[in-house]
Amino acid sequence: MTYRLGVDVGGTFTDLLLLDQKNGSFWRHKTPSTPHDSSEGILNGLGAICEKAGITPADIEYFLHGTTVATNAVLEGKGSRVGLVVTEGYGQVMQIARSFVPGGLAGWIVWPKPEPLAALEDTVEIAGRMDAQGREIRPIDEAGIRAALEKLKAQGVEALTVSLMNGYLNGAHEKRVAELAAEIMPDVPISLSHLVLPEMQEYERTLTTVANAAVRPVVGKYVRNLRDNLRSGGMAGSLSLLRSDGGLMSSEKSEEHPVALLMSGPAGGVTGALWVGKNSGIRNILTLDVGGTSTDVALIENLEARRVRTTEVGHLSVRASALDVKTVGAGGGSIAYVPELTGALRVGPQSAGAVPGPVAYGKGGKLPTVTDANVVLGYLPENLLGGTFKLDREGAKAAVQTIADKLGIGLMEAARGIIDIVNENMFGALRMISVQQGYDPRHFAVMGFGGAGPLHVNAVAKLMGSWPAVSPVSPGVLCALGDATTRMRTETARSFSKRFSETEEAEVIALLEEMAAQTRTELTAEGIAEGDVTVQFELDVRYEGQAFEVPLSISPEALKSDGLAGVKARFDTEHERLFTFNMDTEHELVNLRAVALGPLLELEALRLPEGNGDPIEAKVRDHELWFNGAMAPAAIYDRAKLRAGDVIPGPAIVTEMDSTTLIEGDCVGTVDAVGNILINLA
């Protein structure tokens, strides 16, 4: 058993990438997603990819999976009905929230407040109280707790959250409530705030634990169903899911802690880009993951993906580590339209999705999309998925013509207008994670992947001034590659909340080492050898009086050698980069975290045979496409036949099974040693 299988379930396609751990060879497959039950599409793909590789599912040692099940449950409001147990006097914690209203100055007039994940009628208060040091000042009333739990049971709650005041310092009361709940409602999953998020700020702790409870039954059912189907299909290897922070967690752990999966889908692309960057020597990358419905962007600096401490899904913002991925409603299926009121062309965020899809797919779609515009302009040749998928160019032309007629312009101008607008939307998202975070995009490459990323990456790189524009090997299944090549990760947190001047260095290090031992044990319990586990520390620091803190990652060795003075200096540097100023006030240490990581997959990417620089052997045919306001002669190349060192002058199109790369007329693409196409200005 030497194979790893990465599986990424998207809205339109399910991508699979099978990797031989011995020699680095891989097989890839795309199969239509089955939204009613994702595991159906996965099993279809599993059979097909094993057949391609000439193996059986029993040969797969690791099944590694990025999923949007938790995300979709939140976005579609399909989470379970959650009962919430809080301390007496705090029943309104979810309703009061943070009193922050998004939007402009009139947001408070027009903003409909979202329904909390735990309704007020499903919230019960119980007696008992811990103080701010975690000491019991009022015992709990067991008779009152039983009555409250019986009430929730009668109301039909499907999951239970227990979040008591100062529970993060001492979880004894929460544990006792859980014991009673297990007696009274044995089939209801229970989430305790001191286990899910042992940090101060009761609203964030409660919200995160409620979100965990809301998606637990949905994720649990999905994971158990998938595991059973894989086992009955003959796969005996381990099943792990991708966390929002780009690490892996066992399927059993994901059933208990699904709040860590809310950004699982987009995280796969970032971990795939890290793998590509490591193998091709590109250390600073802006990722551009363009799917059917949306575009996800992230920033990688020095082969480290930027992480944040909040995961945002729709209006929900929970406290859980995640890769800093921003999403905009701009994808291949985004619908172009001209509103009556303004008469100006708009693209997205509405999407044609997988069904009915773009008009060019011939599946009943009637509205013009970004994909249709790409087909009309000649950027997307008529054959996709290696010739197995024919596009309806005439249908696409007729759809885009409706936009041209409304705007009173030509067909090609309308199509190019659609592409320009969607590129600007992607550009805006990339500015959010680079310029607005204090990074200069000119110091980064842009890597385009997902089904449509390589079609747009050249144009977006021009807007950003970020070169080269990179089309990686197998861009359409890069998320699945990321799932297959990342490593196990787990973390634990603790609130500390002391000024640096009052803090003993030895106390901080002792606490972190105790937490590190806990995370190490979690990974060794998953079968990872003690010597293969590495530990990192994270400290949240702020100036005294600030409401928000800056997370800093630091190795145990650096913390011991540089001490808290080193942490202070690093915080000042980061604060100045983010906000352009520093303050003279005291520094405060807010939260501590220990992160344990499993072994990295040490595997070289397959190197391409050397070419002579001329891609003529890979040329499929001559072609015409729209460039700079006119049709221009171009060529279509087959990516499988390109060699290292081949230079492709634009305009050109490079086709492969899972994606299409566009090289614009004033640019040139060079194939690197491992098969990435690096596009630069000519």
Image: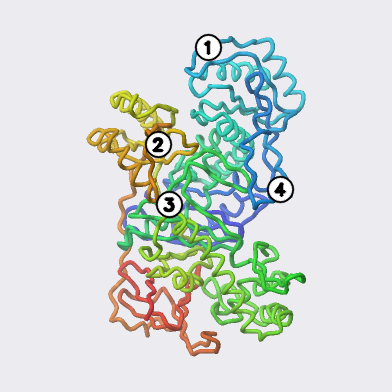
- Amino acid on which disc 3 is placed: Ala
Q: CA distance from mark 1 to mark 2?
A: 28 Å
Q: Estimate the x, y position of residue 361 in percent, counting from the top left.
A: 65, 72
- Amino acid on which disc 2 is placed: Val
**Which type of secondary structure does the marked residue at label 4 adopt?**
loop
Q: Quadrant of residue 92?
A: top right
Q: CA distance from mark 1 to mark 4?
A: 41 Å
The residue that mark 1 highlights is 136
| Residue 657 or residue 377, whichever sits in front | 377
Crowd band around label 2 with a 10 angstrom C-alpha radius: few (<14), some (14–19), many (20+): many
Q: Are marks 2 and 3 in contact (CB under 8 Å)?
A: no
Residue 473 lies, with reference to residue 633, above or below; the image says: above
Looking at the image, tell me whether mark 1 or mark 4 is earlier in sequence order. 4
The residue that mark 2 highlights is 541
Q: Are marks 2 and 4 in contact (CB under 8 Å)?
A: no
Looking at the image, tell me whether mark 4 or mark 3 is earlier in sequence order. 4
On the question of residue 91 being in view, the answer is yes
Residue 669: which disc? none
Q: Is label 1 or label 4 in front?
A: 4
Q: CA distance from mark 4 to mark 3?
A: 42 Å
Q: Estimate the x, y position of residue 122 in percent, counting from the top left.
A: 72, 28
The residue that mark 4 highlights is 111
Q: Is label 2 or label 3 in front?
A: 2
Q: CA distance from mark 2 to mark 4?
A: 33 Å
The residue that mark 3 highlights is 484
Q: Quadrant of residue 400?
A: bottom right
Looking at the image, tell me whether mark 2 or mark 4 is earlier in sequence order. 4
